Amino acid sequence: MSLKINKEQSDHERHAMIKEQIEFRGIKNRALLVALEKIPRHLFVPLEFRQYAYSDQALPSYCGQTISQPYIVAKMTELLSLKKTDKVLEIGTGTGYQTAILAELAGTIYTMEIIPELHDIAKVNPVIQKYNNIHFILGNGYKGYQEAAPFNAIIVTAAPPYIPEMLVEQLSPGGRMVIPVGVYEQTLYLLTKDINGKVMMYPLLGVQFVPMIKK
């Protein structure tokens, strides 16, 4: 596949990605699979890596960051069990691929990015601009976004060394948070908060994310 990808190529590669990488590994949420089929991942990948956009790997992004492996994006999203009425906080906008998927599945998305260049890149992406339910915030993800809290779901796409307490506080009763945690060895956690405010943590699998930046 050349650097310039035509629609027929991208549709074929995206369909194969979903069948061979995502459904094959057990992702069953139909609305999520439809969103993955709809959103052209290659338009969120830097041009020099665009030929690998639908491959089974994380890819380099801008500013020393990465774009997560498609299966990990799907797995983390499925764990949130999103509904169309949900309000979601995303920590780590990146180029906006995960953001677009969330916008397809939930009601309102607040997405935070600490790197100004990435914040600006995501906002002008032509795919992202089709959505009217995304709010972009330039800020420190460790603090969350108190102005719009609480959130039905929180997804963190960079790894802090510990789970930020302010994110836990901003999760609604009955809410779910998916977050990679660790420095040298990282684990993906599902955190739930019941209607009484009791928090439970479930370690799921080993992962490798860029470190979560803290000002």
Image (cartoon, helix red, strand yellow):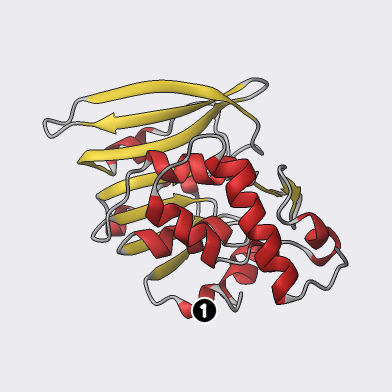
Please determine whether, in this image, residue 174 is positioned above or below residue 138. Answer: above
In the rendered image, which quarter contains the C terminus? top right
The residue shown at (45%, 20%) is: 203
- Residue 94 on image: x %, y %: 61, 56
12 left or right, relative to 85 = right
Question: In terms of image quadrants, where is residue 193?
Answer: top left
- Residue 140 on image: x %, y %: 50, 50
Residue reaching furthest left? 196
- The number of numbered badges drawn on the structure is 1
Residue, disc 1:
129
Q: Is residue 213 visible?
A: no
Please determine whether, in this image, residue 172 is positioned above or below residue 182. Answer: below
Q: Is residue 105 visible?
A: yes
Question: In terms of image quadrants, where is residue 63?
Answer: bottom right
Q: Amino acid at mark 1?
A: Gln
- Residue 118 on image: x %, y %: 64, 62
Residue sitting nearer the eye, 138 or 122? 122
In the rendered image, which quarter contains the N terminus? bottom right
